[in-house]
Amino acid sequence: MPAGRPAGAKGVRSQAQMKKNKKILIKSLQNNLGILAPALLDAAISRGTFNKYYYEDLEFREAVDDIREEAVDFVESQLFKQIKTGGAAQTIFYLKTKGKHRGYIEQTDTNMTIDAIKIKYIIPDEDQQKIENKNVGILPLDNQVIKIELPEKGEE
């Protein structure tokens, strides 16, 4: 029997109906290995109602979390069955996820080279005079101040 409001019901559900809906939803989650969308469909309960139950009822949340952990245990057991029968891809997957501390990690080496470019700054005249009197200039760049060494006059 699907959960939900009785035919013709209006307003807030009774506590008894909510309790019944939660039991139906928990059973549906167990039958669907903790996968929410088909469980909600089977139980005829909306995602919003599920979220309300999940975040407002600690006991319900713990039951849902336990079902999800059971699903992970089940899938993990299937993975081990495939590893035992010589599944190379499954073995590699397991080592990449669970054997990182032993060095089973995938690395990507990246080699980058950047060509040097000249940047020309447009400096206001009043700042230009200050800079010409010294060999060091300070320019704002993206809210940061950078210091540049200016070439001696005649060098370039």
Image (cartoon, rainbow, N blue to C red):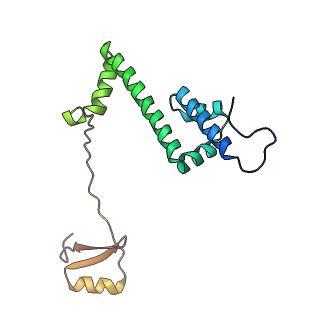
> Is 12 left or right of 69, judged from the image as shown?
right
The residue shown at (62%, 41%) is 19
Tell which residue pokes out farthest to the right in this image.
Answer: 8
Q: Observer-nearest residue: 121 or 101?
A: 101
The residue shown at (53%, 29%) is 30
Image height check: is 150 above or below 20? below
* Picture coordinates of residue 143, whole percent (x, y): 36, 73
* Picture coordinates of residue 153, whole percent (x, y): 20, 78
Q: Observer-nearest residue: 106 or 143?
A: 106
What is the number of callouts on the image? Answer: 0
Q: Quadrant of residue 81?
A: top left
The residue shown at (25%, 82%) is 131
Quadrant housing the N terminus: top right
* Picture coordinates of residue 87, whole percent (x, y): 33, 16
The residue shown at (42%, 25%) is 74
> Is 49 left or right of 134, judged from the image as shown?
right
Q: Quadrant of residue 141?
A: bottom left
Image height check: is 6 above or below 148? above
Q: Observer-nearest residue: 42 or 3?
A: 3
* Picture coordinates of residue 112, whole percent (x, y): 26, 46
Tell which residue pokes out farthest to the front in this image.
Answer: 16
Q: Observer-nearest residue: 44 or 27?
A: 27
Image height check: is 110 above or below 154? above
Quadrant housing the C terminus: bottom left
